[in-house]
Each structure stands twice: as structure tokens, then as C-alpha cells.
Image (cartoon, helix red, strand yellow):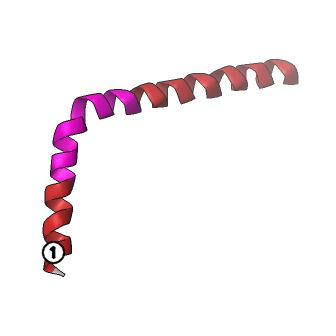
Amino acid sequence: MGRIWKTLEGYWRRDTQQAEQRAVVKAMSIHDHGWWCRMLTVLLPRSSSQ
């Protein structure tokens, strides 16, 4: 029984890791330009005002 659980856990971990990586890649490819522009507009005024 323990071996089955270990195998299932291994599969689940690998699946969730791949899903997370796909989500990150998708988010980066979709939001890349707009996200960086937004980050810069948020960070630059704050750093220049200090």
C-alpha cells in the first residue's frame, strides 16, 4: 500500500510542477510587455521621489 501511495504522490508532484511551470510561462508570454511596463511605472516614480 505504501508503495502505491509513493508512486501516486510522485505522479501528483510532477503533474503539479509541470502545471505550475506552464502557468508561469503562459503568464509571462501573455503579460510580458504590459506587466513590465506597469512594474516600471510603479517602481520608478517611487524610487525617484525618495
Determine whether 34 is above or below 19 in the image.
below
16 relative to 47, above or below: above
Residue at position x 23%, y 35% in the image:
31
Q: Give the amino acid type for the residue marked by disc 1 in the picture.
A: Ser
Which quadrant is the N terminus positioned in?
top right
Residue at the image position 16 percent from the left and 50 percent from the top: 38
Residue 48 drawn at (x, y percent): 15, 74
Mark 1 secondary-structure assignment:
helix
Q: Residue at x 31, y 32 (%)?
A: 27
**What is the quadrant of residue 46 in the picture?**
bottom left
- Image-quadrant location for residue 45: bottom left
Classify 10 Å Cα crowding around label 1: few (below 14), some (14-19), many (20 and above). Answer: few
Say if the magenta span includes residue 32. Answer: yes
Is the stretch drawn in magenta largely helix, strand or loop? helix
Mark 1 — residue?
48
Of residues 5 and 41, the one drawn nearer to the viewer in this rendering: 41
Look at 19% across and 38% down and name the residue there. 33
Q: Is residue 17 visible?
A: yes
Residue that lies at the very extreme toward the front in this rendered image: 48
For residue 27, side relative to residue 24 (left or right): left
Residues shaded magenta: 24-39
